[in-house]
Amino acid sequence: MSDKNSAIGVFDSGLGGLTAIKQLRKILPDEHFIYFGDTGRVPYGTRSFETVIQYAYDDMKFLSGFDIKMAVVACGTVSAVALPSLEKKFDLPIIGAIKPACAAAYSSSANGKIAVFATPATISKKAYESELMKLDASLSVFSVACPMFVPLIEAGYISENCEVTRIIASEYLSKLKGTGADTLILGCTHYPIISGLISSVAAEILGHDIKIIDSGYESALAAKQLLSERNLLNGNSGGSVRFFVSDETQNFKATASIFLGEPTENVTKVSL
Ligand code: DGL
């Protein structure tokens, strides 16, 4: 039986959920986190819905083997494709990435023109678009599938001046030219790892700033709200995080250390 002292399970197809972990650790410093990155099977976003649902089930099953009180699906693709099926199969509160990001984008946009960058699966599911339309049917939404970002980020091409990633970002951002979008949802949790690069290329290509919404950050805020509403916040001080991945740990450790700004040694390889 889980209680306040139980951990929070967080998962993604790979490194992307670190954007949520970074924020969760800041916003909920006294909580214990178990992170699973399915680095052996990343990317999810170019796979069929059926496969994503199966992988999401495996990931949650792995996390359920720990004493967890809630789960954060720190993956836009799984949130778009598999959240209802996870909610049916697992009896614990689950926070997805889409609703919180859409609510933040809606309140941030001054002109109601919102762009979404996400994986091909998320875009073809129209997940962000439908959620934004529920908030306000008069919004204009410009969705762009960005299949190249995840492989680049997983391979560590994340520095702000990385030429290759800048070229790919220009390609995707040029699709927003002339739309007038003032807000951009990074609808895949991998993308905030390169949000500095995306902002700087956006300013060059669009000629104006665009407000960036980080779905990892918004999910972290939503997780805190849910725990506090259910009186499940950990009252003891001193949280922790344990990382599990399904492929070799070296690459994950290296990128995680750069992104989290602290050495990330506590990483174990598991097979599902
Ligand atoms: N980080 C994930 C997402 O938010 C998955 C990316 C992928 O595996 O393609 O969509």
Image (cartoon, rainbow, N blue to C red):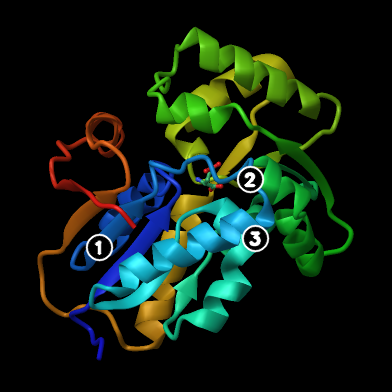
Left or right for 260, reference 184: left
Q: Which mark is residue 33?
A: 1
Write the residue at 50% across / 61% down: 56
Query: Does the beta carbon at disc 2 come under 8 Å from ligand 1?
Result: yes
Report the amino acid beneath label 1.
Answer: Phe
Which comes sooner in the sequence, label 3 or label 2? 2
Q: Which residue is mark 3?
A: 81
Query: Which quadrant of the rendered structure holds the C terminus?
Result: bottom left
Which is nearer the N-term, disc 1 or disc 2?
A: 1
Mark 2 crowd level (few <14, some 14–19, many ≥20, 10 Å Cα): some
* Mark 1 and mark 3: Cα distance apart in space: 24 Å
Whether label 1 touches label 2, CB < 8 Å: no
Say which quarter of the image contains residue 257: top left
Spot the residue most to the right.
138
Nearest the camera: 164 or 66? 66
Quick one: quadrant of the N terminus?
A: bottom left
Q: Residue at x 21, y 62 (%)?
A: 29
Identify the residue under disc 2: 47
